């Protein structure tokens, strides 16, 4: 997947997240205190996707199973980073209620589909390993 294609699809994914969150902000005054959290969450997942894309492209060019290793390790690293982010937000800002979890899970899900899509595209472009 070329870089320009990745950036275009990343912007579409951001719009797919920001549009419903913006509508929720507009329609529900109770959501407005979570605006900063929604922005931080979008930024976090954008950075995770960019790093994953760069690592995926870099390892896809190499022979061996480096690409598979990146896919497996990135799943665990993403979970650890996002759980740490949630813990930090809850500790630092002490939000009332658990509405922030809905925002987080929505963005996590949309970006999860996006990451599966672009990593699949990178994997398809990877030369097959020779059979033993």
Image: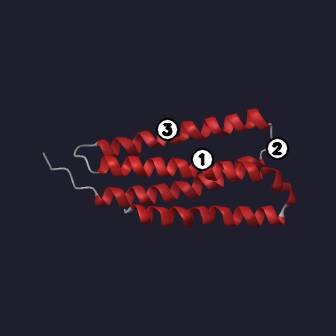
Extreme-right residue of the structure: 29
Extreme-left residue of the structure: 132
In the rendered image, which quarter contains the C terminus?
Answer: top left
**Badge 2 is on which residue?**
97
**Badge 3 is on which residue?**
77
**Badge 1 is on which residue?**
44
Determine the residue positioned at 27% across, 51% down.
Answer: 61
Say above or below: 13 vs 99.
below
Say above or below: 75 vs 27.
above
In the rendered image, which quarter contains the N terminus?
Answer: bottom left
Describe the element under mark 2 as helix, strand or loop. Answer: loop
- Distance between the alpha carbons at the discs numbered 1 and 2: 22 Å
Residue 121 placement, left or right of 99: left
Extreme-top residue of the structure: 91
Residue 60 numbered mark, or none = none
- Frontmost of labels 1 and 2 is 1
Query: Is tag 1's residue or tag 3's residue first in the polypeptide sequence?
Result: 1
Asked where in the image residue 30 lies, by quadrant, the reply is bottom right
Describe the element under mark 3 as helix, strand or loop. Answer: helix
Residue 117 placement, left or right of 123: right
Q: Position of residue 127 (x, y in %)?
A: 22, 56
Q: Residues within 10 Å of mark 2 (few under 14, many from 20)?
A: few
- Distance between the alpha carbons at the discs numbered 3 and 2: 27 Å
Extreme-front residue of the structure: 4
Q: Position of residue 11 (x, y in %)?
A: 55, 64
Q: Are marks 1 and 2 in contact (CB under 8 Å)?
A: no
Say above or below: 113 vs 88.
below
Q: Residues within 10 Å of mark 3 (few under 14, many from 20)?
A: some
Determine the residue positioned at 80% across, 36% down.
Answer: 94
Q: Position of residue 95 (x, y in %)?
A: 81, 41
Q: Position of residue 40 (x, y in %)?
A: 67, 48
């Amino acid at each position: 997947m070329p870089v320009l294609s990745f950036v275009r699809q990343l912007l579409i994914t951001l719009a797919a997240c920001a549009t419903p969150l913006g509508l929720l902000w507009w329609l529900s005054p109770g959501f407005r205190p979570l605006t900063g959290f929604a922005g931080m969450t979008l930024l976090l997942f954008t950075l995770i996707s960019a790093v994953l894309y760069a690592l995926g492209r870099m390892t896809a060019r190499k022979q061996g199973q480096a690409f598979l290793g990146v896919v497996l390790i990135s799943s665990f690293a993403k979970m650890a980073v996002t759980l740490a982010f949630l813990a930090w937000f809850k500790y630092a800002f002490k939000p009332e209620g658990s509405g922030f979890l809905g925002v987080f899970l929505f963005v996590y899900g949309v970006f999860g589909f996006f990451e599966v899509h672009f990593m699949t595209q990178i994997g398809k472009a990877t030369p097959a390993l020779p059979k033993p």
